[in-house]
């Protein structure tokens, strides 16, 4: 978790209302975890997770209102004294006046969400996880080919962007060209997107930078995509052996997720976009339970068996 | 031109794995190589062609080598068939 996120970014992202503590909007969050300080409001501060954003729902508020004013003051004082990043109240909560006073005093934002507690937890956790997760970048193109998030890699000048252009023309979506930022949302779920400046742009040698949304419409672009397949383009090498049947699956590991990868040799006679498209379709078929190469291998075995029985009869 | 008879003793016959090995070797030589089994002739350089024959274990098939490097090709194919026959069975 090397990334940092400020409260104001969260406010913008989650469309939160700032009720107090606006001077603390530049405070940083480092943990994607959230907590509800229910036990703390009841007086148990031994396990107070003060490095996390504190969420207060109607349950906590109702309990808080049953406390006597001097106990309320004491508990709120203790909650703020450890300086958590922010307090967020969910939809149907009337924010107690004490929180607003202390928010301004300690410069800790007190925020209000339009979500109810459960969905607030879910949404906020996803936002924090996405922004705080460790990121890595890969040089290549990320496309959504009929639902299969496909990375096309290969050395510079091999024609990755040209393949992307052709795939966009066939109705598939571009996610990122040239540089793909990748983070792991959870184990086995890798998400790729373009860096902010490069979003929606494609660089084609000889033409320059083109905005795919402007050229092809909104259906040609998508913001983020889960990564399922890596296709590595390389120049055909006569001395290299290529997988002829597709029975062995290769893997490439990013963070601790394995992604199916394949090496695709290209020549002038091979239409690269069609090959990448075929690779993505074959991957999808395998996900749906049909493996062409294994099916073929099975019928071959039956044929060999039949031939060997015929031989014995002779 | 060289003509020779071979036999696969690997119990599964000439299935995907040994056929891939054989075709890979064939493709590293320029000579024309023909595989003949039960009156069907296919080029040894095509994986689908070789597999279409469905050659089982312990049957005889004929290979012909024709070209500038036919001698080397013959020796290499002979060697790979020995290797195939020693493959561990799945």
Image: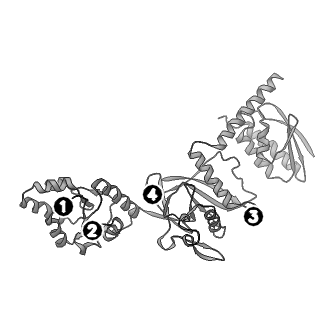
Q: Is residue A307 above or below residue B19?
A: above
Q: Which mark is residue A196?
A: none
User: At 58% from the left edge and 74% from the top edge, which residue is drawn?
Assistant: A210
Residue under pointer 2: A17
Q: Which mark is residue A94?
A: 1
Q: Nearer the viewer, mark 2 or mark 3?
A: 2
* Number of other residues with Cα within 10 Å of mark 1, as a class: few under 14, some 14 to 19, many 20 or more: few
Q: Is residue A222 left or right of residue B13?
A: left
Q: Nearer the viewer, residue A228 or B28?
A: A228
Location of residue B60 in the rendering, given as x and y in whole percent from the top left corner? 84, 33
**Rounded to the nearest whole Å, what is the CA distance between mark 1 and mark 2?**
13 Å
Subunit of label 2:
A
Q: Is residue A46 visible?
A: no
Query: Which secondary structure, mark 4?
Result: strand
* Number of other residues with Cα within 10 Å of mark 4, as a class: few under 14, some 14 to 19, many 20 or more: many
Q: Earlier in the sequence, mark 2 or mark 4?
A: 2
Q: Nearer the viewer, mark 1 or mark 4?
A: 1
Query: Which secondary structure, mark 1?
Result: loop
Residue under pointer 3: A268
Residue under pointer 4: A184
**Rounded to the nearest whole Å, what is the CA distance between mark 2 and mark 3?**
58 Å
Q: Earlier in the sequence, mark 2 or mark 3?
A: 2
Q: Nearer the viewer, residue A287 or A74?
A: A287
Which quadrant holds the C terminus of chain A? top right
Q: Nearer the viewer, residue A216 or B16?
A: A216
């Amino acid at each position: 978790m090397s990334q940092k996120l400020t409260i104001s970014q969260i406010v913008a992202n989650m469309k939160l209302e700032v009720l107090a503590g606006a001077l603390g909007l530049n405070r940083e969050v480092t943990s994607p975890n959230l907590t509800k300080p229910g036990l703390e409001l009841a007086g148990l501060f031994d396990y107070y997770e003060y490095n996390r954003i504190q969420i207060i729902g109607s349950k906590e508020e109702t309990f808080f209102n049953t406390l006597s004013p001097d106990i309320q003051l004491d508990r709120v004082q203790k909650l703020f004294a450890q300086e958590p990043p922010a307090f967020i109240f969910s939809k149907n909560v009337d924010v107690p006046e004490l929180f607003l006073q202390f928010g301004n005093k300690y410069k800790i934002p007190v925020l209000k969400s339009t979500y109810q507690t459960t969905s607030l937890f879910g949404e906020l956790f996803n936002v924090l996880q996405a922004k705080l997760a460790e990121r890595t970048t890969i040089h290549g193109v990320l496309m959504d080919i009929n639902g299969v998030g496909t990375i096309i890699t290969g050395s510079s000048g091999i024609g990755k962007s040209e393949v992307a252009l052709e795939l966009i023309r066939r109705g598939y979506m571009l996610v990122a060209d040239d540089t793909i930022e990748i983070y792991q949302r959870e184990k086995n779920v890798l998400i790729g997107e373009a860096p902010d400046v490069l979003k929606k742009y494609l660089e084609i040698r000889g033409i320059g930078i083109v905005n795919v949304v402007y050229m092809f419409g909104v259906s040609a672009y998508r913001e983020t995509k889960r990564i399922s397949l890596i296709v590595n383009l390389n120049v055909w090498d006569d001395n290299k052996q290529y997988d002829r049947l597709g029975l062995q699956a290769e893997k490439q590991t990013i963070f601790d997720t394995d992604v199916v990868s394949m090496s695709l040799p290209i020549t002038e006679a091979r239409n690269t976009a069609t090959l990448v498209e075929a690779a993505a379709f074959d991957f999808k078929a395998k996900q749906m339970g049909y493996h062409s190469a294994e099916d073929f291998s099975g019928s071959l075995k039956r044929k060999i068996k039949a031939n060997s029985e015929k031989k014995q009869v002779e | 031109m060289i003509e020779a008879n071979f036999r696969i003793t690997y119990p599964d016959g000439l299935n995907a794995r040994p056929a891939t090995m054989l075709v890979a070797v064939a493709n590293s030589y320029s000579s024309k190589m023909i595989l003949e089994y039960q009156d069907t002739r296919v080029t040894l350089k095509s994986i689908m062609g070789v597999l279409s024959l469905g050659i089982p274990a312990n049957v005889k098939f004929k290979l012909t080598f024709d070209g500038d490097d036919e001698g080397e090709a013959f020796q290499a194919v002979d060697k790979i068939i020995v290797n195939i026959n020693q493959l561990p069975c799945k």
